[in-house]
Image: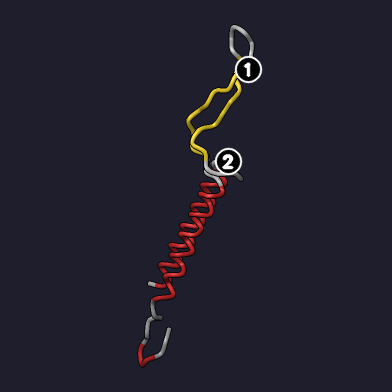
Amino acid sequence: MRTSLRVAALLIALTVAAFWFFSGPNTGFTKNSVMHMVKDPVTEIPGPVYEDRFVPGVDFLGGGLAVALVVAGSSFFFRKPVGPAGTKG
């Protein structure tokens, strides 16, 4: 049980870090929309246009790593398995 919780914590941490990094590592807070400047075809004046897109920030990364830390820490509440003749291992 201890080992499986530690492996699960490692997988959670790697998954969260990879998702944050490969979706554009945003060093600010998580965003649900991104602004783009687009020129108006008639007046040629640039104006903001918002696109609905999820961009995870450092709060997403920190929260995911905190969950991984809690899962890894919970592995210390379980005893090591006892082998034959009372030896640990």
| Sooner in the amino-acid sequence: mark 2 or mark 1 | 2
Residue drawn 46% across the image and 69% down it: 73
Residue 89 placement (x, y as % from top left): 43, 83
Identify residue type, mark 1. Answer: Pro
Left or right: residue 12 compared with residue 48: left
Q: Nearer the viewer, mark 2 or mark 1?
A: 1
Dividing the image into 4 quarters, which one contains the N terminus? Answer: bottom left
Give the residue at x 53% y 51%. 61
Q: Residue furthest left?
A: 84
Residue holding disc 1 = 46
Q: Which of the pair 84/27 is nearer the observer?
A: 27
Q: Mark 2 sits on what residue? A: 24
Q: Residue at x 56, y 28 (%)?
A: 35
Q: How far is the residue under mark 2 from the one under mark 1? A: 25 Å
Of the residues shown, which amino acid type is indicated by label 2?
Gly
Q: What x and y, as percent, mark residue 55?
A: 52, 39
Q: Which mark is residue 64?
A: none
Q: Nearer the viewer, residue 79 or 63?
A: 63
Q: Secondary structure at mark 2?
A: loop
Q: Is residue 66 above or below residue 23?
A: below
Quadrant for residue 7, please give it: bottom left
| Number of residues whose C-alpha sits closer than 10 Å to that of mark 2, classed few (under 14), some (14–19) or many (20 or more) | few
Q: Position of residue 17 (x, y in %)?
A: 54, 52
